[in-house]
Image: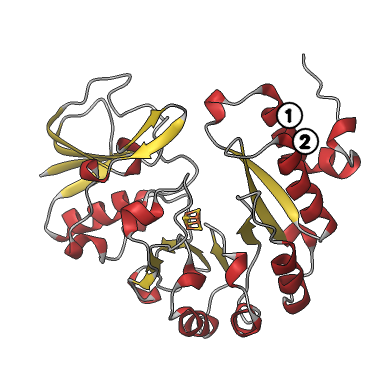
Amino acid sequence: MKIGLWSDSHNFPNLPIMKLSAYHKSIGDDAELYDHTKHYDLVYASKVFSFSPDIDSVYPVQADEVRKGGTGYCISVINGREVYDKSKDSMLPKEIEHIYPDYSLYPDYSYAVGFLTRGCPRQCGFCVVGKKEGCFSRQVADLDEFWRGQQEIKLLDPNLLACPKHEEILQQLSFCKYSFIDFTQGLDIRLINKDNVYWLNKLKIKNIHFAWDNPRQDLTEHFKTFSELTNVKDVRRKTVYVLTNYNSTIEEDLYRIYTLRDLGYSPYVMIYQKEACDKKHREIQRWVNCKFIFHSVKRFEDYKPNYK
Ligand code: SF4
């Protein structure tokens, strides 16, 4: 069979697509990234984002069959809130989910990527993880399922520290030979303690990410504790995602941003439903995320956006 593989992921390899490619090649099919000028027996379309255009938005798909999957197909926006419909979602069959990904699909990326754990108990209102993967974090794979000596490892785990086995996992990671590891989805600062930071300190982490999404929760003490325990001292290597435009006022957004900066972290603003936010949210995002502006203009009130 001739298989076409499409995804809406840009600047990052799509993991389900790489696994589907590996599976089809293992049973003798031809698999390649989708080319709209060709005809395929079967096309897989994987969508991560609800707002991105679909595979057939510009050209009709030439294929005998098209199978669509991914969170992006299961979210609709109702009254300004994203609603996830699990009944529309489809998981990969076990034999494909646990196959070694076909990294050759994305020759521009040299890192290994995958999940060691799935699920999260937090149930944040803006996040689909609990509904999609379950409200408890558990180990789903060993590193060798998707890593064979690549220099860099990118983990996609939603909440690794919530997994009861996380110290064992961190310990195993500390024994592997790689150059850098990246917890792309961030670590849960509320679960940081002396024991797990001991193991985190043994890893080669380029940039550690956390999040401070809920303005009603004061995480100051947790961030102070981490700063005392970690050997990551450079502010540029300690990034904290700050969610705005979701149940927070501008004052609450600025409070989190100023507090994090004063504690020696680098805030990074994410806007919920960016398409529907007001101008001020975009201005705050630009002020914070353009680091040369953020470091030269200390207070948002003094920031003068330059509209052309
Ligand atoms: S802690 Fe993170 S992964 Fe868990 S529900 Fe909240 S946003 Fe999602």
Q: Would residue 177 be found to the left or right of residue 59 on screen?
A: right
Q: Please state, as top left, top right, bottom left or bottom right, where the C terminus lies in the image.
A: top right
Q: Are marks 2 and 1 in contact (CB under 8 Å)?
A: yes
| Amino acid marked by disc 1 | Glu
Dividing the picture into quadrants, the one containing residue 192 is bottom right
Q: Is residue 3 above or below residue 26?
A: above
Mark 1 closeness class: few <14, some 14–19, many ≥20 residues within 10 Å:
some
Tag 2 residue? 287
x then y, percent, for residue 18: 31, 53
Helix, strand or loop for disc 1: helix
Dividing the picture into quadrants, the one containing residue 75 is top left
Q: How many marks?
A: 2
Q: Residue at x 17, y 61 (%)?
A: 26
Q: Would residue 247 be found to the left or right of residue 19 on screen?
A: right
x then y, percent, for residue 77: 40, 29
Tag 1 residue? 283
Q: Is residue 206 above or below residue 165?
A: above
Helix, strand or loop for disc 2: helix
Q: Which mark is residue 294?
A: none
Any atom of ligand 1 within 8 Å of the CB at mark 2?
no
x then y, percent, for residue 13: 42, 49
Task: Give the image's coloring scheme.
Answer: secondary structure
Q: Residue at x 28, y 41 (%)?
A: 85
Q: Please state, as top left, top right, bottom left or bottom right, where the N terminus lies in the image.
A: top left
Q: Residue at x 73, y 73 (%)?
A: 225
| Amino acid marked by disc 2 | Trp
Whether residue 232 is visible: no
Whether residue 59 is visible: yes
**For this rendering, which residue is in front, 246 or 283?**
246
- The CA distance from mark 2 to mark 1 is 6 Å
**For this rendering, which residue is in front, 145 or 238?**
238
